Image: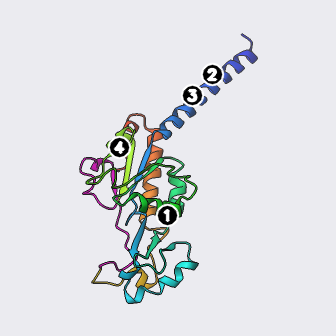
Amino acid sequence: MSFIKQFFSLFDKTERRNKLSCRHNEEKTKNLHLVLDLDHTLLHSISVSELSQREKYLIEEADSRVDLWRFDKGNPNENLIKLRPFLHEFLKEANKIFYMYVYTMGTYGYAKRVLSLIDPDKIYFGDRVITIEKSPHKKTLDLLSADKRRVVIVDDTRSVWPQHKRNLLNIAKYFYFRDGMKSEKSYAEKKRDESRSKGALSNVLKLLQKAHTRFQEEEEASNDLRLLIRD
């Protein structure tokens, strides 16, 4: 075989090997799933009637802020929804490496309302939403068509996942409003907020990205993503 033929033969083999490797990595990535809670994980919701006196300035600010929404204006059930800092960046980056789901103990109507704010075009979650109507007593991965070894849960409450704590990344609760807190002022009362760059969602994203990288690189460990989120 001539040198030129040998060169192109080697080139073809390398190309095939690279394509197979890329395809393998893509398939592995597509099989990763991220389940996200809503309340106190991605946002904080409160009835306007429960706002403290020092928080009522937010009622008027809601119309001019992109992280705060006001619903049912003037009604007894009027409420505010405050997004956690870094939420949009988190969803955009996490969507690159996971199929994402919302799983909340709230009602479907409530989840639909929230998702109309954070994912109006269904880019991140599609119709992958599980609510209290389907899961009234506890949360379970049995409702997902996914390999449980390749699912990560981000939730502020451990107790609702009695069977899947190995999959759980327990995020710190997000409280923006006073909402029953007695010993200290709320973020809203202080007119400040959780850090974007060093806050809970930013830290969780870094951990997820690190686990994903290892999942792609470490053949044996990557069979079980739950092992990689513990390091």
Q: Is residue 196 above or below residue 125?
A: below
Q: Is residue 17 left or right of residue 78?
A: right
Q: Nearer the viewer, residue 97 or 136?
A: 136
Q: CA distance from mark 3 to mark 4?
A: 32 Å
Residue that mark 4 sits on: 143
Examine the structure image and report whether residue 51 is included in the region drawn in magenta: no
**Residue topped by disc 3:** 20
Quarter of the image where one finds residue 182: bottom left
**Looking at the rendered structure, which numbered label has been put on residue 13?**
2
Direction from residue 63 to residue 148 in the image, left or right:
left
Give the amino acid at mark 3: Leu
Amino acid at pointer 4: Leu
Report how far apart the C-alphas of labels 1 and 2 lie in the structure.
44 Å
Looking at the image, is mark 4 or mark 1 nearer the viewer?
Answer: 4
Measuring from the top left, give residue 51's x and y in whole percent: 38, 82
- Mark 2 / mark 3, whichever is N-terminal: 2
| Region in magenta | 156-180
Q: Residues within 10 Å of mark 3 (few under 14, many from 20)?
A: few
Spatial CA span between label 2 and label 4: 43 Å
Q: From the viewer's perspective, is residue 101 above or below residue 82?
A: above
Percent from the top left, x then y, of residue 204?
42, 58
Residue at mark 1 = 87
